[in-house]
Amino acid sequence: MTHAKTSTIDLAARWLVLGLLLVYTIYNVGPIFWLLLSSFKSRMDLFTMPPKLFFTPDLSGYQSVFGVGAAKDSASAVGVFDSLINSIIVSVAGTSLAVFFGTLSGYVCSRFNFIGKGDFMFFVLSTRMLPPVAVLVFYHLMFARLGLADTRFGLVLVAIFANVGLATWIMKGFFDGVPKEVEQIAIVNGYTRMYAFTRLVLPMVKGGIAATAGFCFIFAWNEFAFASILTTTQAKTLPVKISAASGATGIEWTQICAAGVVLIIPVLIFFYLIRKHLLMGMTFGVLGRS
Amino acid sequence: MAEITLKNLSIEFGSFKAVDDVSLTVKDGEFVVYLGPSGCGKTTTLRCIAGLVKATHGEVLFDGERVNDLTASERNIAMVFQFVSLYPHLTIKENIVFPLKARGIAKSEIARKLDWVTDVFKLGDELRRYPGALPPGARQKVALARAVIRDPAVLLLDEPLSAIDEQFREEMRWELGHLQRQLGVTTIYVTHDQREAMSLADRIVLMNDSRIVQVSQPDRMFFDPVNVFAGQFIGSPSMNLIDLVPVEGGLRLGESEVTLTPERDRLPEWAMASKRPLKLGVRPLNVHLTDDQATGVPLPVDDVFSVGRERFFSFRIGDGIYQGVDKRQSPAGSAGRVHFEPEGLLFFDAATGRRADAEVAA
């Protein structure tokens, strides 16, 4: 009796959980699915009520995003291809450099004591507490003076500034998880500290580097506030471009949706590439101690 | 291999004295175990010998030569740490030959040495695997192999077994002692586990509060502790420590009515004569239950219980509970008298904690 009762409750609980997961999935995937559908719709289909699930695909959105085909010279084309390239350059360069510097400083903060270390760590953390809006104007003035306004280089700098603190903290955590004996054994045996760092410690925190890169990349890729203020024509990134995608004939929803899909794809590719390291990385090395 | 000498070694971190005026000579090929509670300075001493920590005062000598200013890599030492520090991305073989690679040793020589340690540590099947695939005990064996492959002057082991499962630890301990004798390498081993120290050491160096308490062979350490700390730190279950109050005709046990007498308990004459408060140190294995009025004293027995094949009982003096070993298999709850074996009685000065009888003997 008891057994049957328990299993009924178990079953109910399982269905409830499944139901909640289903709702959650729809909530998350729904908008993306809608975006994907809309990116293939013509202007006519886009505004049909109720929305159509089946329609004749229209590739004009993608054509204008990549500047090919019939849409190439059309007056309504917004031409976001350049900003896609901008986004990729800024994100990849910004992420790489932030992770590079963050790894070095994270190692120093994990292994060495220096005067004002606590204050330094707090300062580094505080760079992430600042709402971007608070300093935007001053960045703008500074960048204008330095000739960095509307340049990819300027945006790369912003991406580094914004991420290096986060990268330092995350990497410090991973280095803390590597026993200091790893270097001591090497030093006792006549290797240099540099050798120990590059050849022994770094391979041990691969997962951490991947996870850090993931966080930094998402931030750099999605960054909107700085990019929208600091760019005018040349260095506009994809999120900025999409937000202002209006052509000669009004807001080009199909193109916006196509560009949105294009915006998602590099993130998917990036996380696909680092997926192997991610499980260990996201658990902050808790599972990985050997 | 080398003889290691510490001369008045002190190590300070700011105002904290981690090691305070320690002198010791470890003979060539000797197995010395530093034993003591956490924070007593034993690991710091070891790291100073390794060259990972600088001496504040005093000298470290290898074969009579001062090495204070040599770096860790110039001292030709090998270390094994508590947490297995193999490199997870290198194979077992690459891990083992790691110390040789740094010195540009010829490939044929490396291969010869590798064969040798593989043979000694019986690691033939594991060489191509990665550390992650080995159980912790086996990993520590690899760490040992890595340590000895370059014929170090001294092998420094910092609690190498304490992170290993109990079951495997026994086996590793035995193997470690065997290997050390086989290799004949001067070995300094740090542990807080007195059983490890007792079973491995040629000599034990007992430390407490940054100073050396006693240096002696394991059995001497057990039977002849220099003070209360040494007596209680060594041995399990730990030594009973009972107040002795000088009274007419004997020494009274703490707050009880029971008095040990010179005749029955063979109290030494000086103890009777000194007339000062003492502490009686007596190990549970020297305290028994008896019905004999002539040798036993009446003390309330609380409990008789078995731990495996051994049978213990607890008795009470005032508020204190003490332990003895019951050799006659009394049923639980049985009353009886408590017999203190005269040859197991150690006397400590109540004020200083130092051995009182040794002081008199000296």
Image (tube, helix red, strand yellow):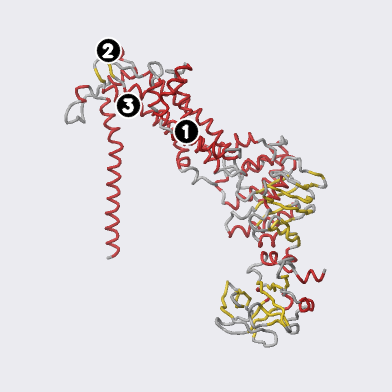
> Contact, CB < 8 Å: mark 1 with mark 3?
no
Instruction: Farthest residue to the bottom: give it.
Output: B293
Q: Position of residue B255 (x, y in %)?
A: 63, 78
The residue at the point 29 percent across, 58 percent down is A7
Label 1 packing within 10 angstroms: few (<14), some (14-19), many (20+)? some
Q: Where is mark 1, residue-wise?
A: A127
**Mark 1: which secondary structure?**
helix
Label 3 packing within 10 angstroms: few (<14), some (14-19), many (20+)? some
Q: Which mark sits nearer the N-terminus, 2 or 1?
A: 2
The residue at the point 31 percent across, 37 percent down is A28
Residue B112 shown left or right of residue A246 in the figure: right
Q: What amino acid is at disc 3?
A: Gly
Q: Both on one chain, marks 2 and 1?
A: yes
Q: Position of residue B84 (x, y in %)?
A: 60, 48
Q: Which mark sits nearer the N-terminus, 2 or 3?
A: 2
Q: Is residue B336 above or below residue A285?
A: below
Q: Both on one chain, marks 2 and 3?
A: yes
Label 2 packing within 10 angstroms: few (<14), some (14-19), many (20+)? few
Q: Where is mark 3, residue-wise?
A: A260
Specify the subunit that label 3 lies on: A
Q: Both on one chain, marks 1 and 3?
A: yes
CA–CA distance between discs 2 and 3? 21 Å
Residue A48 shown left or right of residue B65 in the figure: left
**Which of the 4 image quadrants contains residue B211?**
bottom right
Q: Position of residue B186 (x, y in %)?
A: 75, 51
Q: What amino acid is at disc 2?
A: Ala
**Mark 3: which secondary structure?**
helix
